[in-house]
Amino acid sequence: MITDSHAHLYWKDFDGDRAEVLARARAAGVAHMVVVGTDLTSSRAAFDLCAGEPGLFPTAGIHPHDARAATSAERAEIEALCRRPECVGVGETGLDWFKNLSPRAEQLESFLWQLDLAQRLDKPVVIHCRDAHADTVRCLAQFPRVRGVMHCYTMGPAELAPYLEAGLCISFSGVVTYKKNEANRAAAAEVPLDRLLVETDCPYLAPEGRRGKRNEPAFVVAVLEELARTRGASAPELARATSANAARLFALGEGA
Ligand SMILES: [Zn+2]
């Protein structure tokens, strides 16, 4: 059994063939998918999608790109979604100093709010970090009891230590398959097996050979195969371990 720990399956990219995408995922062994919200509208869409699909689990949160647009009323709605028993995590939140689609102060404030929410609810937080390593670590240090995942970890081995020391899981995406990404593969070789997750971040970040095309959960197999090569392990062994880790972190039951 394989778990795609981060998928945006509600987006319009999948409107034309969502049933086929899910069928291909299940045929490839991807039985569990965490469907991650990025603002109030998409978080609601994640809950709606997961309610009718076995093995799909929603989160609710505000992406750093969307931090600027979120009102306090929307935050209250996000918190209400996060409190629902079927919600497996808080986020996607974090910091993006690369695109800077929201002002930094608003990203920081939104990230700290969601870290606090995750710690209060004792639910894992899903963290996006792009070109913001030092500030992400500083924010995390304020919430010592927070659990969660560094989603789509794209950095190298040098940046791993503070996240592992904070008890976080580290999730690798199609980025680990990219030809020039030796540093990311070196990080993937160092993460302890009980902290490792895999994801697609679909529809983005299709693996090498499909770059620039739409990604989908079935393609998480390519991430597992790359990790197997990198770690000198077998893909089925890594599928089992990463699924067990995801089930533990997100408290995944059988879903809808
Ligand atoms: Zn995402």
Image (cartoon, rainbow, N blue to C red):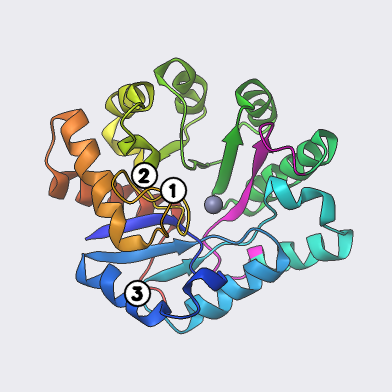
| Label located before the other in sequence (1 or 3) | 3
- For label 3, being within 8 Å of ligand 1 is answered no
The answer to if 92 sits in the magenta stretch is yes
Q: Could you say where residue 231 lies in the image, as x and y percent from the top left?
A: 19, 29
Magenta residues, start to end? 82-101
Q: Residue furthest right?
A: 72
Q: Name the kind of residue labelled 1 in the image.
A: Leu
Residue at (64%, 54%) from the top-left corner? 121
Kind of residue at disc 2: Gly
Mark 3 and mark 1 in contact (Cβ < 8 Å)? no
- In the displayed structure, 220 sits above or below 110; it is below
Q: Would you say 93 lies left or right of 229 here?
A: right
Q: Nearer the viewer, residue 21 or 116?
A: 21
Q: Is residue 226 visible?
A: yes
Residue 237 placement (x, y as % from top left):
15, 45
The quadrant of the picture occupied by the N terminus is bottom left
Relative image position of residue 201 (x, y in whole percent): 46, 53
How many discs appear? 3
- Work out whether mark 1 precedes mark 2 in sequence or the reverse, and give the earlier one: 2
* Residue under pointer 1: 205
Q: Are marks 1 and 2 in contact (CB under 8 Å)?
A: yes
Local SS, label 3: helix
| Mark 3 residue type | Leu
Q: CA distance from mark 3 to mark 2?
A: 18 Å
State how far apart marks 1 and 3 are (Cα).
18 Å
Q: Is residue 205 magenta?
A: no
Residue under pointer 3: 22
